[in-house]
Image (cartoon, grey):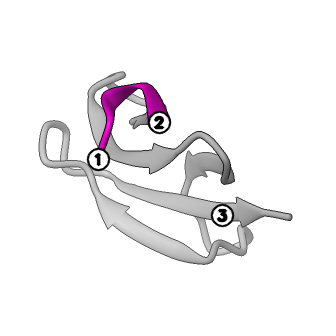
Amino acid sequence: MDKEMLVQLKCPFCKRRILDASKSIKSSIQPASQYSRSDYYAKCWNCGRIIGISKIG
């Protein structure tokens, strides 16, 4: 996959890269809480906090 086709999604706490996503997919990344609804959840490998990732559109 070409690097020009990817965008890095970063942890909102420590700003380290969580994952790469296609530029054609719109994504939202936010701190996970009991009130947030996300499509995916990931644990930041650097700071250990849980991150909510939503696919938009």
- Looking at the image, is mark 1 or mark 3 nearer the viewer? 1
Q: Which mark is residue 36?
A: none
**Residue under pointer 3:** 54
Mark toward the start of the polypeptide (2 vs 3): 2
> Whole-Å distance between the Cαs marked 1 and 3?
22 Å
Amino acid type shown at disc 1: Met
Q: State the residue in front, 33 or 30.
A: 30
Amino acid type shown at disc 2: Met
Q: Is the residue under label 1 in contact with that under label 2 (CB below 8 Å)?
A: yes
Q: Is the residue under label 3 in contact with that under label 1 (CB below 8 Å)?
A: no
- Looking at the image, is mark 2 or mark 3 nearer the viewer? 2
Amino acid type shown at disc 3: Ser
Magenta-colored span = 1-7
Q: Check the image and report above or below for 3 versus 51.
A: above
Residue 31, percent from left and from top: 54, 49
Tell me the element at label 3.
strand
**Residue under pointer 2:** 5
Tell me the element at label 1.
loop
Total number of numbered discs in the rendering = 3
> Whole-Å distance between the Cαs marked 2 and 3?
19 Å
Q: Which mark is residue 1?
A: 1
Task: Locate residue 7 relative to residue 2 in the image: left or right.
Answer: right
